[in-house]
Amino acid sequence: MRVAIVGPFAFWPKATVSRRAFPLALSLAERGHQVALFVAPFDDPARSGKTVSVRGIPVVNVPTGPDSALNRLVVPVRLALAVSRWRPDVVHTFKVAGYAATAGLYLRLIGRFPWVLDADDLEGSGGWADVNGYGPLTTRLIDLQERHLPRLAGAATAASRFLGAQLVRWGVKADRVFYLPNGPVPPGA
């Protein structure tokens, strides 16, 4: 099976891709699946547009360009196009809001690939939006994505039982929510 894993930001310095998505990618590859990671490295611009291999897993860094309102719309399209060209059997996006989630929505709208969405944190109100001091408009947009996109995915994974229950409270059918705790981080990740 060809599995595309889509991350919301660079492999480094943040942990979602390197500590959550990548261990899953390695585990799938060790079981014989073809896996590629697709990321939007706005937080590591030197990698923008480059493909690297990490322990045999290709990491495709789509071009991000400077931070702008236009690029916030264009980068998810670039992610979706890169994934689509790779022709996966399934797409697993990480984070319920932002670039990866929006790319998952685009892929869902064109109807070509089964989509699984991962929740590893609360992102909007009561979560990272509050911690990072995002303004009310940004927080509202994140809330909209966080509460509605998981219902559009074919399935959802959750890093904790709490997040899994939260997804169900937001309307995801319980039989489509799967507990996927963080696994051990492989050496060199």
Image (tube, rainbow, N blue to C red):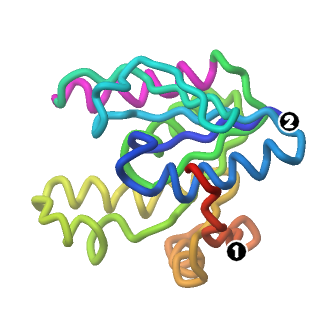
Q: Are marks 1 and 2 in contact (CB under 8 Å)?
A: no
Of residues 100 and 105, the one drawn nearer to the viewer in this rendering = 100
Q: Identify which amino acid the numbered label 1 is placed on.
A: Ala
- Identify the image quadrant of the N terminus: top right
Q: Identify which amino acid the numbered label 2 is placed on.
A: Met
Of residues 179 and 151, the one drawn nearer to the viewer in this rendering = 179
Q: Is residue 111 above or below residue 84?
A: below
Residue count near mark 2 (Cα–Cα under 10 Å), binned few <14, some 14–19, many ≥20: few
Of residues 13 and 60, the one drawn nearer to the viewer in this rendering = 13
Residue at image coords 28%, 77%:
126
Residue at image coords 64%, 15%:
85
Q: Residue 174 carries which label?
A: 1
- Mark 2 element type: loop
- Mark 1 element type: helix
Residue 83 counted in the magenta span: yes
Residue at image coords 35%, 49%:
13
Closer to the chain start, of discs 1 and 2, is 2
- Position of 175 with respect to 170 (left or right) is right
x, y (%) of residue 77? 43, 24
Residue 145 counted in the magenta span: no
What are the residue bounds of the magenta stretch? 68-84
- Position of 107 with respect to 122 (left or right) is right
Residue at image coords 14%, 60%:
134
Q: Which mark is residue 62?
A: none
Q: Mark 2 points at which residue?
A: 1
**Most prominent secondary structure in the magenta stretch?**
helix
Mark 1 and mark 2: Cα distance apart in space: 25 Å
x, y (%) of residue 114? 72, 40
**Of tags 1 and 2, which is closer to the observer?**
2
- Position of 79 with respect to 153 (left or right) is left
